[in-house]
Image: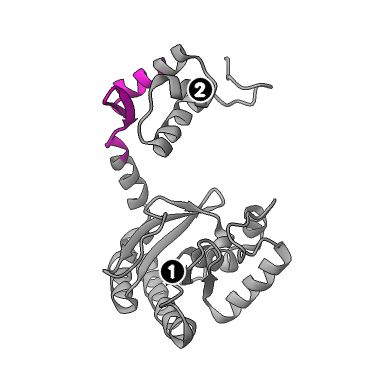
């Protein structure tokens, strides 16, 4: 079988091309055959064949002569997240938490070494950033991610943190030793802070969601601008509310 990969790695090149097109359409919104061809380094005939196949299967649609992702992906995405007991266990509790804090809240699980938001809710004054349901993030740059890293199995943490730690802002912890010191402090107090480590001007408080046997299931956080997330409110009041919500969600997820 022709895998389409140098060295016969067992990966199917045609499949990688199709998903490369899907990801490019996600980034750009709409694209024509020529743009897809140039971006992926494939011939126009190959790009056209893949786009036509995806359209035939219902995964892309024509918009003003170009191609875009279809709403069929909504069904797939919803199915993917609803298989998590954590999603169902989080909804009511996260809504109440966000009402109390007045900002934005999110629920995260880890997949393939990155954090994935499976639920997000925002108050009227809460700020929307670049994150949304399905967004993936570097775990070391967020309060939810650091909460997860602090309480996950040590071997798993080593796997996730192998290699370089991307620095997204001047405050991102990109040194492994410094990060381990931070994670130890998070384990001690039970919650994590994100002080402008992913987005300048934004802070967050996160806590792990644990099962009754202390297995990490995911994590939650609330985030808001530095102008509001400050002082005793940020350092004491919000952490108390976040950790309490995380405990309730953990119980619900364990026994639902």
Asked if the stretch drawn in magenta spans residue 52, the answer is yes
Q: How many labels does the image show?
A: 2
Q: Residue at x 57, y 51 (%)?
A: 113
Give coordinates of residue 194: x percent, y percent: 53, 70
Left or right of residue 206, residue 160 in this image: right
Quarter location, residue 106: bottom left
Magenta residue span: 49-73
Q: Residue furthest bottom?
A: 232
Question: Does residue 165 appear left or right of residue 193 in this picture?
Answer: right
Mark 2 or mark 1, which is nearer to you?
2
- Residue at figure coordinates x 55%, y 55% from the top left: 138
Q: Where is residue 185 in the image (x, y as percent from the top left)?
A: 62, 77
Quarter holding the C terminus? bottom left
Q: How crowded is mark 2: few (under 14 residues within 10 Å), some or many (20 or more)?
A: few
Considering the numbered disc 1 on the image, is that residue within a helix, a strand or a loop? strand
Q: Name the residue under label 2.
A: 38
The answer to whether one can see residue 96 in this image is yes
Q: Quadrant of the N terminus?
A: top right
Decide if residue 161 is on the left or right side of residue 204: right
Give the number of the disc on residue 70: none
On the image, the x and y values in percent for residue 2 come to: 58, 15
Q: Which residue lies furthest to the top in this view?
A: 45
Percent position of residue 175, x then y: 70, 62
Instruction: Tell me the crowding category of disc 1: few under 14, some 14 to 19, or many 20 or more residues within 10 angstroms, Cα based.
Output: many
Is residue 94 or residue 171 the one in the foreground? 171
Is residue 62 on the magenta stretch?
yes
Front residue (pair 119, 157): 119
x 48%, y 71%: residue: 203
**Which residue shows up at 45% across the image and 33% down it?**
24
* Residue annotated with mark 1: 221
Q: Which of 22 and 150 is in front in this view?
A: 22
């Amino acid at each position: 079988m022709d895998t389409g990969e140098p060295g016969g790695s067992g990966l199917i090149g045609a499949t990688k091309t199709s998903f490369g097109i899907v990801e490019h359409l996600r980034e750009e919104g709409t694209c024509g055959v020529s743009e897809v061809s140039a971006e992926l380094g494939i011939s126009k005939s190959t790009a056209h064949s893949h786009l036509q196949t995806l359209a035939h299967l219902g995964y892309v649609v024509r918009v003003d002569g170009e191609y875009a992702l279809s709403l069929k992906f909504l069904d797939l995405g919803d199915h993917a997240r609803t298989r998590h007991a954590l999603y169902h266990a989080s909804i009511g509790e996260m809504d109440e938490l966000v009402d109390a804090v007045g900002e934005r809240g999110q629920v995260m699980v880890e997949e393939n070494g990155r954090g994935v938001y499976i639920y997000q809710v925002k108050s009227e004054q809460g700020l929307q950033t670049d994150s949304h349901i399905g967004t993936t993030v570097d775990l070391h740059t967020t309060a939810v991610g650091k909460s997860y890293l602090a309480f996950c199995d040590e071997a798993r943490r080593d796997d996730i943190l192998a290699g370089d730690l991307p620095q997204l802002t001047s405050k991102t912890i990109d040194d492994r030793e410094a990060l381990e010191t931070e994670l130890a402090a998070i384990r001690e107090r039970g919650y994590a802070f994100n002080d402008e480590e992913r987005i300048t001007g934004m802070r967050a408080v996160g806590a792990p969601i644990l099962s009754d046997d202390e297995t990490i299931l995911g994590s939650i956080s609330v985030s808001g601008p530095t102008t509001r997330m400050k002082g005793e409110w940020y350092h004491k009041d919000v952490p108390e509310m976040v950790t309490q919500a995380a405990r309730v969600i953990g119980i619900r997820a364990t026994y639902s």
